[in-house]
Amino acid sequence: MNIVTLLFAMCIAGPVAWATAPLTGDPADCVNPLSGANGDAEFSRGNTVVAIVAPFGMTTWAPQTDGDAGPFYQMKHTQFEGIRATHQPSIWIRDYADFLVMPVVGSWEGSRKDRASRFSHEKEIARPYYYSVDLDRYQTRIELTPTERCTMMQFTFPETNEAAIVFNNEGLMETTADAANRQIRGKASHVTFGAPGGFGMFFVAEFQQPFEAFDINRDGKMTTAAVRLAKVNAGKPVKMRIGTSFISYEQAALNLRHEIPNWDFAATKNKSKAAWEKELARVHIKGASPEQKSTFYTALYRSLQFPRIFHELDEHGKKRHYSPFDNGKIFDGPLYTDNGLWDTYRAAFPFFVLYTPDWSADILEGWLNAYREGGRLPAWPSPGNRPCMIGSHADSIYADAWVKGLRTFDIKDAHAATLKNAMESNPWAGRDHVEDYIKFGFVPADKRKDAATSCTLEYAYGDFCVGVVARAAGKEDIAQKMFQRAKNYEHVWDPKAGFMRGKLSDGNWQEPFDPLSWGGPYIEGNAWQWLWSVQQDPYGLMKLLGGRTGMSAKLDGLMTMPSTTVVGSYGHVIHEMREVEYSKMGQYAHINEPDHHVLFFYNYVLQPWKTQQAVRRVMDELYNRDGMVGDEDTGEMSAWYVFNAAGFYPFCPGTPCYLIGSPLFEETVIQLPKGKTFTVHARNNSPENRYIQSARLNGKNFTKTWLAHETITAGGLLEFEMGPKPNEKWGSGETDAPPNYLN
């Protein structure tokens, strides 16, 4: 049965240009923050927050159209409820320390839905550094611009004596007013997981002009506070600035003085734009259509949001942070949060290492701080660890950073932390059923009722990364043990079925078995999609599949078979199933992260033209400036696009190489440290000319289908000649294939 109904297909079949202000000019003005908002929990077009935020900003400021919906802003909605201070990294992870700000004229009491106003996308502008919207009901315009921990807003009312700015919060909100200082303050205490008692975000809101009155209504956990203004004149903005902190009210005020020291809205906006231009300038593209340019820089913007900063600066500029990993104590040093490492270890963190090594170094140090404070590396921090997804993929990010030359963190601490992941269960911060995994060499499907085979595959890859870190720390004996465990994927290989399968503790296979059935021993996928989760040993997997011929045939089958799905143990259709069917790429599930490397297996079987065709198809068909098919997942989907637009991809994080695909643009220039650049130039490139005919690296003929990290970071020029038909000779020699790092 085809899950995607005709009516549903009609709703999503064609891209709709939602951004009314032209997405042209500087890279920051090509970004579309509304991208990803044209979907919902039933079918994802990104399911992203409309993030008006500084790069990696601690607090995001986002429009809200329905606080009961996921996402809380959707393009189809017609009512506007306010600007939300949010830390929600995904619609599947609940927000924390959030509050809502809404200007009104007239009555302010009642619920946020009572105060909501109609609005139109034609009267809305969204950029990473600026947002504005006109509220029809109140004839009022909201404008805001963000900094890392603060925002400045201005409200342009009609002439009235009844203007008010309303704060609304789910959870405890302690608010006091000081009219002499034109200031209010509060504590947004809402949180569900991952924080100790007493957690909350302190905020201080200051007004340029005195307010007339301050009123509070409390209803259970809900607090509504209204700042009632004296008479306002039409066309004269009322300015407000807000500082936030997880440390104290005093720190919130200090953050505000650091980041927004005056009332110059235009200057704050320009500063915010400059921060984004600095980050977006790390990549320059040439030969993109306006649509492609917007899609690319929107993807780059999404790649530069998570994990979010969780540290703050004291009066001397020294970093310190509130620790959700150690009962809210205050420590010196950096800390970051809000990231799903199960998703992001694949492309987002390798992106940081190559494109933003400065940010990467700070993030890695921050998460070693989390280990030092709480005894574990983060797995899904938001703000502290949450029990979500599987595996301990901080192992991967430390291995990847080290083998690619980043030496800013303590390798002994990284080794101790990653080895602990491999040896001790902790479902709140990584792996569970580790003892069973060590005993049996796999996670038995009768011990772990769901996702057991996925766990085995993820743990085996994680063991490889733990081994890489152990070797770097001088622990070769431990490294060898971990490399041996990295072959545990073989224990769930069923040669008769030709798939990785659920296996019981008595050694029998879990029955019944349908490779199209979702769930059971697989998380968010089926046997076809999880077969390939052996990045650490592609040649070992190739051997199981019958050599290059067998692997090639299996890949072809994956890509060309019907896209129908079987709901399996889920018992109902989930959005990922709909998205696989919509994509019409066989059982390849780009919409979910475990398949993000799969297209590059063709490079190992000496058929790189199939990789070239497939990655271009994904970029052309599943991404546009208004979103992508599938959940963004804290930057992973966008980082995949940014890498592949340049023509290469980190197939196996923890190894120092990238596999070549098909560059999307005529030219991509990556800005590297010390003024170096690496340029990818693709002559005769076009949507039709997606196949590599020949290549030259720094002026010399180049036939390998992979690039060493050090080749890129040394700077240079990689030139491709593109054409409309595959050149089956290029990259097809034995010595052209990528290396194997697990021997």
Image (spheres, grey):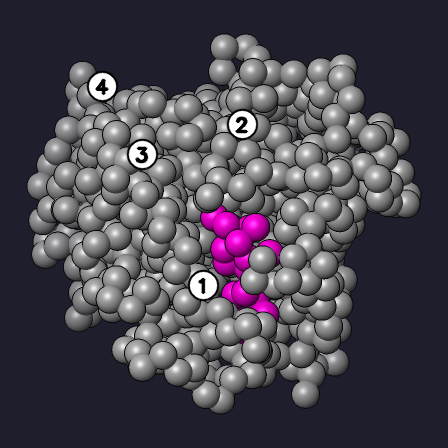
Kindly tell me whether residue 21 is visible in this rendering.
no
Q: Is residue 75 above or below residue 356?
A: below
Amino acid of disc 1: Glu
Quadrant in the rendering for residue 332: top left
Residue in the picture at 37% in, 30% down: 402
Residue in the picture at 43% in, 82% down: 509
Q: Report the disc number at residue 490.
A: 1
In the picture of the structure, the residue carrying the numbered disc 3 is 471
Instruction: Indicate which label's residue lies in the foreground, 4 or 1.
Output: 1
> Which of the two labelled residues, at mark 3 and mark 2, occupies the earlier sequence position?
3
> Who is closer to the viewer here, 6 or 115?
6
Q: Is residue 529 magenta?
A: yes
Give the alpha-carbon distance from disc 4 to disc 3, as whole Å.
Answer: 36 Å
Instruction: Indicate which label's residue lies in the foreground, 1 or 2.
Output: 1
In the picture of the structure, the residue carrying the numbered disc 2 is 709
- Answer whether labels 3 and 2 touch (C-beta < 8 Å): no
